[in-house]
């Protein structure tokens, strides 16, 4: 991985971006994209769009290719501060509640970060009924060490966002772990593609998008795809790695870290886009994995496909262990190969490419 690109990845993963609070991370993206884009703009929703224009133009309209990764991550929101100074919260996105318990957290306030921990009654104090049921959000709280409500109010406001403690943790064999791999690795991949396409001849316009609010309903992809009106759109997200104990490969597919990008097939995927992705991989000796999905995916590809009169859509995913947890794990090599795949795809297509199934 290029040194500047590695620095970019670590900056993404160290910057908070719960859904609806993506502005800080979009500035990180903007600074990385500046040297490689012909134009950078932000829409009213908060999506950041970097444009690389075609270097060769024919007589007809120039096709538009949208490459999207969502920059938002799971979080919590402060809903209430009780008399003792404890914060009551609700989820931003789909948390598995037991995973949150005992985690170090950060409350992102207007005056700066405030350290906290996610807490509930100690197991010794639980009633038998409490021990036998899954905790709900009303059973837990965030402790920031405040002595009372007055002190907590001086630090934290209702509506402040909270994340797991952020940071990049290198692992063995080129793996890495961090909160928010979903989907900052997708953002990294599409903007690394922008870097790789710099000064390369192109016959299509490339719109590279850091979308917002995917975790609460694919919202940024819907608005940005409507505004861009792409001919082709590829979402880059994470998917479940099934190389861990208990994973059901027969239902989810055989996907492993380090096996390369995952190319999806199914109703959400345009067959021509799928074919071009596979051909681009084969022509450039890029290792890939294949996964089927027999319905709409829960990714930005779903929203992109349905924009306006419809978009020829693809989905490339990076295998991820421990999805929606503070210890999501990916292989850096899968990210690098994914950016190589998208680069090869963008270079091989043209205004003459047929996207009709």
Image: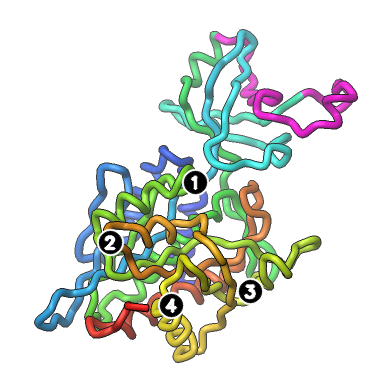
Cα–Cα gap, marks 4 and 1: 26 Å
Q: Position of residue 103 (x, y in %)?
A: 69, 37
Cβ atoms under marks 2 and 3 closer than 8 Å: no
Q: Which mark is residue 215?
A: 1
- Residue 345 is one of the magenta-drawn residues: no
Cα–Cα gap, marks 2 and 3: 37 Å
Element at label 4: helix
Say few, some or many: other residues with alpha carbon within 10 Å of mark 4 (under 14 / 14 to 19 / 20 or more).
some
Q: Which residue is mark 2?
A: 309
Which residue is drawn at the image coordinates 63% and 53% (left, top)? 323
Q: Which mark is residue 258?
A: 3
Ranked by sequence position, the earlier of labels 4 and 2 is 4
Q: Which residue is mark 4?
A: 271
Q: Position of residue 161 (x, y in %)?
A: 49, 32
Cα–Cα gap, marks 4 and 3: 26 Å
Ranked by sequence position, the earlier of labels 2 and 3 is 3
Q: Position of residue 58 (x, y in %)?
A: 13, 83
Left or right: where 139 falls relative to 45: right
Q: In this rendering, does residue 322 appear at all?
A: yes
Ranked by sequence position, the earlier of labels 1 and 3 is 1
């Amino acid at each position: 991985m290029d040194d500047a690109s590695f620095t970019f990845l670590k900056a993404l993963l160290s910057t908070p971006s719960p859904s609806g609070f993506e502005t800080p991370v979009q500035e990180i993206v903007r600074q990385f994209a500046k040297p490689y884009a012909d134009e950078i703009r932000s829409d009213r929703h908060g999506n950041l769009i970097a444009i690389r224009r075609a270097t060769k133009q024919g007589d007809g309209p120039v096709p538009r290719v949208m490459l999207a990764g969502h920059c938002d991550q799971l979080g919590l929101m402060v809903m209430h501060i009780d008399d003792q100074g404890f914060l009551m919260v609700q989820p931003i996105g789909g948390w598995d509640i037991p995973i949150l318990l005992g985690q170090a957290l950060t409350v992102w306030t207007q005056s700066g970060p405030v350290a906290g921990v996610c807490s509930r009654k100690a197991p010794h104090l639980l009633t038998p009924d409490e021990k036998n049921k899954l905790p709900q959000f009303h059973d837990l709280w965030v402790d920031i060490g405040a002595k009372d409500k007055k002190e907590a109010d001086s630090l934290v406001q209702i509506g402040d966002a909270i994340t797991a403690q952020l940071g990049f943790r290198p692992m063995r064999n080129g793996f890495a772990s961090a909160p928010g791999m979903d989907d900052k690795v997708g953002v990294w991949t599409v903007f690394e593609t922008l870097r790789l396409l710099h000064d390369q001849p192109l016959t299509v316009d490339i719109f590279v998008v850091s979308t917002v609010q995917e975790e609460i309903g694919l919202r940024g992809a819907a608005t940005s795809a409507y505004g861009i009106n792409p001919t082709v759109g590829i979402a880059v997200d994470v998917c479940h790695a099934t190389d861990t104990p208990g994973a059901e490969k027969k239902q989810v597919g055989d996907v492993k870290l380090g096996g390369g990008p995952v190319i999806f097939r199914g109703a959400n995927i345009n067959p021509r886009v799928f074919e071009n992705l596979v051909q681009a991989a084969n022509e450039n000796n890029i290792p890939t994995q294949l996964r089927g999905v027999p319905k709409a995916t829960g990714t930005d590809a779903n929203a992109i496909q349905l924009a306006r009169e419809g978009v020829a859509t693809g989905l490339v995913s990076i295998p991820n262990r421990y999805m929606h947890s503070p210890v999501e794990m990916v292989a850096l090599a899968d990210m690098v190969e994914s950016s190589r795949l998208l680069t090869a795809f963008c270079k091989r297509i043209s205004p003459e490419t047929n996207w009709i199934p």
